[in-house]
Image (cartoon, rainbow, N blue to C red):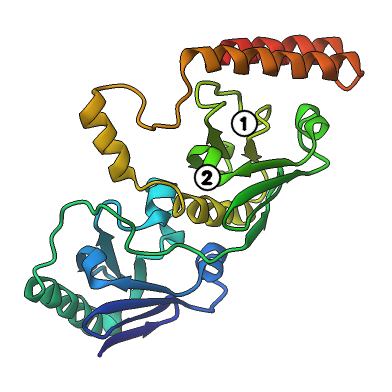
Amino acid sequence: MAEIIQRDGTWAFDGTTVRITPGLHRSVPLFRQTYGEIAVPLEAVASVVFEPERRRGRLRMRLREGADPLLQATGGRLPEAADPYRLTVDVDRAGVAEYVAEEIRHALLLDQIPKEPTKTYLLPGPPVPVSVRSSDGVVSFDGTQVRIDWSDTSDRVKRATGPRIIHVGDLAQVEWLPNSGQEDGFLRFVTRETVFSKLPPEKDPYALDLWGSVRRDLLTALVATAVTARLPHPSTRTEIDRTHGPGPTTAALPPPADHHDVLLRRLRELGELHRDGVLTDEEFARTKAVVLRGF
C-alpha cells in the first residue's frame, strides 16, 4: 500500500485502485468535500506526476479521456482548488508523494494500461438522488429525471412556467460553466426540442443561471456529472460523426420539421403568458426577439 495523508486529503494506492479522500480542513473546497471519496481504477489513469515547489508541491493525476463523467461534464473548467485529482503536499512529505506517484506509474507499465480514450465511463460519478440549491433555484436528479424549482429571484418567464421536469431520455447533452465571480455561469439541459435554441441562461427555462455564491453554485457540477454519467458515452457520438460526416453529434437531434414546430410552440407559450398578464409588453417583445434569434 502506497499512501500519503495531507491536510488537503489522502491518496492511497493498493495496486489496482487509487482511493482519493478529501481532507476535512476548512481550506478544502466545499465541492471536493461534498463530492466525497473517489475510487479511481488503475485502468482509468493516464499519468501521475509530483510537481515539487519551494514551499509546497502537488500530486496531479491525469485520467484517460472519456473515463470520468465528472471531467466530461465540467470540461476541465473546475477551479484548480476544486480539482479532486490534485493534492497539495507539504515540503517535508515530498519524498512520500514521489513514492506514491512512482508506484502508480510502475503499475501502469506492468499492466500495460493504454492512454487512448475509453469507450465507456470507468468511474460512476456521484450517487443519486442528488439535489443542489443554486442562485437560480433548486436542481434535483433522481436517476431518471431532472427537476428544477425556480427561486424567487429567477426571471419572471421561468417562474411563470413553473417547475421544469426533464426526463433523461429527452436529453441530448448537459452544458456547464462555473460562476467565476466576475462572469455568470450556467447549467443547461439541452433536450431534443431545445438543441437548436440557445436562449440566454437567465431566460432559458432549461437552464440555471449561476450568479450568486461561487462556492455554492459550484455544487451544480454534481448534478451535471450525475446526469452525464447516464447519457450515451461521448465515444458513441464520435461513431456517429464517422458514419455521417460533419454536423450534429447526437442521434436525438430533431428533423427540420420538428425544429419549426418547436419554434411555434415556444411562441404560443409566450403569447399565452402575455395574454394572462404574466409578461409585460416590453418583456414579451424582448423574450420573443430572443427566441427568434435562437432559432
Circle 1: element type: loop
Give the residue furthest to the bottom: 1
Q: Position of residue 117 (x, y in %)?
A: 21, 51
In the figure, residue 282 lies in which quadrant?
top right
Residue that carries the numbered disc 1 in the rendered image = 201
Q: How many other residues sit within 10 Å of disc 2, few (<14), some (14-19) or many (≥20)? A: many
At label 2, which amino acid type do we have? Pro
Binning the other alpha carbons within 10 Å of mark 1 as few (below 14), some (14 to 19) or many (20 upward) gives some
Looking at the image, residue 82 lies above or below residue 259? below
Q: Residue at x 45, y 62 (%)?
A: 125
Q: Nearer the viewer, residue 93 or 156?
A: 156
Label 2: which secondary element: loop
In this rendering, position of residue 275 left or right of residue 286? right
**Is mark 2 in CB contact (under 8 Å) with mark 1?**
no
Q: Using the image, determine if residue 114 lies above or below residue 203.
A: below
Among the 4 quarters of the image, the one containing residue 263: top right
Question: Is 186 situated left or right of 55 in this image?
Answer: right
> In front here: 286 or 226?
226
Please identify the quadrant where the C terminus is shown: top right
Q: Which residue: 51% across, 56% down? A: 226
The CA span between labels 2 and 1 is 13 Å
In which quadrant is the N terminus drawn? bottom left
Instruction: Name the residue rendered at 65%, 29% in the picture.
Output: 204
Residue type at mark 1 is Pro
The answer to whether residue 110 is above or below residue 49 is below
Residue 127 visible to the viewer? yes
- Could you say where residue 152 lies in the image, as x and y percent from the top left? 83, 41
Left or right of residue 172, residue 39 in this image = left
Q: Position of residue 260 (x, y in %)?
A: 57, 11
Inspect this view and state whether residue 55 appears.
Answer: no
- Left or right: residue 200 compared with residue 237: right
Kindly identify which residue carries mark 2.
Answer: 178
